[in-house]
Amino acid sequence: MKTLHFDCFAGIAGDMALGAFVDLGIDPDSLRGELAKLGLEGWNLDFVRDERCGISGTRAVVDIDGSHDHEAHDVEEHEHDPHEHDHHETHEHYHSHEHAHHHWSDIRALIQNASLSSGAKARALAIFGKIAEAEAQVHNKPVEEVAFHEVGALDSIIDIVGTAVCLDILKPDRITSSTIELGGGTVKCAHGILPVPAPATLLLCKGLPVKTGGFQKEMTTPTGAGILAVCVDEFIESASFTEIKTGYGIGTRKLDKPNVLRVSLRETASEQRTDESALWDSETLILIETNIDDMTGEALGFLMERLFAAGALDVTFSPCTMKKSRPAVIVSALCSQKILDAVRLVLFTHSTAIGFREQQVNRLSLRRKIETEQTVVGTVRQKTVFLGEKALRSKTEFDDRARIALEKDISLAEAERLINEK
């Protein structure tokens, strides 16, 4: 199984991701050719060799309307924030020249109508949609009303769609990441000077393992956080693996520590084993349980939504009988150790529980792979489960079946039939 790993010890930005992918072996001309399918004008994408603190790699340079959107090669760390254009500015902007704004609905239509591969298109839409949702929450606006300044929008489209194209070319079976370095200090945004992380970045990193203080600069941008939030299957701190190839995306700042993003293709040791344990994954998780007898069904439903939003892997309700023969519900939430406090906080703030039980459990699970497919009724996601390397069964994601059923005003069964129609 091929694993792609993001090592974000110096954070991540969209241009750093593109540079790392090209350094990993993606052909720049092929990437530019795919981006040209968007039909956008006024941009150019170049890749140059560069180094930071002795580490050499590739730096992506996005040129918008004849001026570099990121810092120049020789800009020192005390100068202006190199990622200010990477923030998706809503309505107000602080550029010296006037440009139009593009709403999220416009950008979505642009990507949907492009002749990109279905996989690249679906991933780009998911990343941009995630960022738009975060910006909408920050500015207290409906998602459809989120507007991006033209320069920031073009830059983000190149970074996000380019990343989606690269991942579609590489086609990793699994994507992992290290803990995300957010940085420190302050960052200049459209609305003034704000502490790092920027509000949108913080929302996008909700439920993800992060750290701060390694740098006194903004190191992870909303675009970088959106890429990780959507694309990463698992965040890991240690692993046993065979390194296949490594690429370095060079950041724009010159600091006393290497401002680079390392991306590597790996084959993990567990994927090379031939004994029975290689047929499935094994991990240690935390099971939290509490008995509740004084919440309505609606309130319990909201609790389930909040637990999943906090990162719980599974949430179930089971009927039980408590003292004095009171009917009640056992609320069970399964999560990793990394987000345990977030799940605890949800239980204490969104339920009537005043305590709960915790125990370590060992979960065995089959490997899952989600791929996008183009059908006669549109793009859908197909989930396939594997026993080792053998595919056992595939199933269309329910959300896609439901979406098509609503769009076509048909039953779920009819939607499934049309999806499977060849």
Image: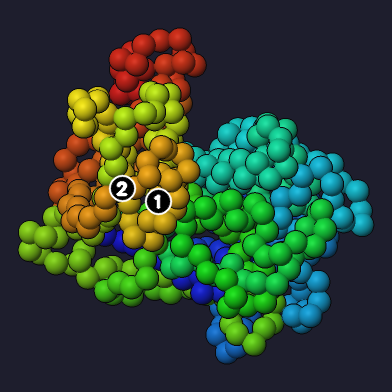
Can residue 246 be seen here?
A: yes
Q: Alpha carbon of mark 1 to alpha carbon of mark 2: how far?
A: 9 Å
Residue 252 at what x, y percent from top left? Answer: 69, 74
The reply to whether dot 1 and dot 2 touch (C-beta < 8 Å) is: yes
Residue lying farthest to the left in this orientation: 275
Q: How many callouts does the rendering have?
A: 2
Which residue corresponds to the image point at 36% horizontal and 28% vertical from the top-left?
Answer: 294
Tag 2, which secondary structure? loop
Residue lying farthest to the bottom in this orientation: 54
Amino acid at circle 2: Phe
Residue 256 at what x, y percent from top left? Answer: 64, 87
Is residue 359 positioned above or below 180 on the image? Answer: above
The quadrant of the picture occupied by the N terminus is bottom left
Nearest the viewer among 76 and 266 is: 76
Q: Residues within 10 Å of mark 2 (few under 14, many from 20)?
A: some
Is residue 374 positioned above or below 209 on the image? Answer: above
Residue 298 at what x, y percent from top left? Answer: 43, 24
- Displayed quadrant of residue 182: bottom right
Tag 1, which secondary structure? helix
Which residue corresponds to the image point at 28% horizontal and 37% vertical from the top-left?
Answer: 291
Question: Which mark sits nearer the N-terminus, 1 or 2?
Answer: 1
- Does 36 sit left or right of 78 as displayed? left
- Displayed quadrant of residue 340: bottom left
- Which residue is disc 1 drawn over? 344
- Find residue 305 and name its label: none
Nearest the viewer among 308 and 57 is: 308
Can residue 59 be seen here?
A: no
* Nearest-to-viewer mark from 1 and 2: 2
Residue 126 at what x, y percent from top left? Answer: 52, 42
- Does 44 sit left or right of 264 as displayed? right
- Find residue 356 and name its label: 2
Q: Residues within 10 Å of mark 1 (few under 14, many from 20)?
A: some
